[in-house]
Image (spheres, rainbow, N blue to C red):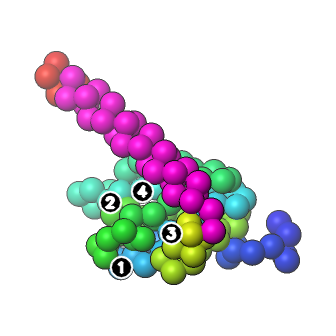
Amino acid sequence: MDPGALGKFYQAGEVIIHQGDQGECMFVIQEGQVAILKEIDNREVQLAVRGPGEFFGELALFEQETRMATVRAVSPSRILTIDKKSFLRRIHEDPSLAYNLVKAMSGRIRQLSEEVVRLERLLKK
């Protein structure tokens, strides 16, 4: 990992955000992988794994709600934090960033919808 690179370094197993924390920024994975984990009935359920170039925590830029999941580094990772002010400034400079964010979020909604259908079918068996 380049010590001069932007972003914060996390060791494998280190928690980046906790479910239930107040969110004020989003994160972009520069290096490594992270697991998105949801605590349900006192156990962790892995929802997704994300890698370089992907992002998480973006809902905090749009709503002042608590974090819906815990995110933990799976491998040594460098994570860039982007607050709302910086995000809006970058969108003003390059509107295609907003399009790319919405496109990625749309893909995640599609995946979640497919998962709901799959789970409903399992429950009906």
Q: Disc 1 to disc 3, how far (Cα)?
A: 12 Å
Per the rendering, the mark at residue 79 is: none
What residue is at 59 percent from the left and 54 percent from the top? 96
Q: Mark 4 points at which residue?
A: 37
Q: Principal SS element in the magenta part?
A: helix
Q: Can residue 39 be seen in this view?
A: yes
Q: Mark 1 points at which residue?
A: 22
Location of residue 88 with respect to 58 vertically, above or below: below
What residue is at 48 percent from the left and 77 percent from the top? 84
Q: In this view, does 37 lie to the left or right of 52?
A: left
Tell me where residue 125 appears, x and y as whole percent: 16, 19
State the SS at label 1: loop
The mark lying in front, picked from 3 and 2, is 3
Task: Determine if the magenta segment contains residue 115.
Answer: yes
Q: Residue type at mark 4? A: Leu
Name the image quarter holding residue 63.
Answer: bottom left
The span picked out in magenta is 93-121
Tell me where residue 50 appears, x and y as whole percent: 57, 50
Task: Determine if the magenta segment contains residue 84.
Answer: no
Q: Can residue 74 be seen in this view?
A: no
Q: Residue type at mark 2? A: Glu
Q: In this view, does 38 lie to the left or right of 87?
A: left
- Residue contact at pointers 3 and 2, CB within 8 angstroms: no
Q: Disc 1 to disc 2, how far (Cα)?
A: 16 Å
Q: Name the residue under label 3.
A: 26
Q: Disc 3 to disc 4, how far (Cα)?
A: 16 Å
Q: Name the residue under label 2.
A: 39
Q: Disc 4 to disc 1, how far (Cα)?
A: 16 Å
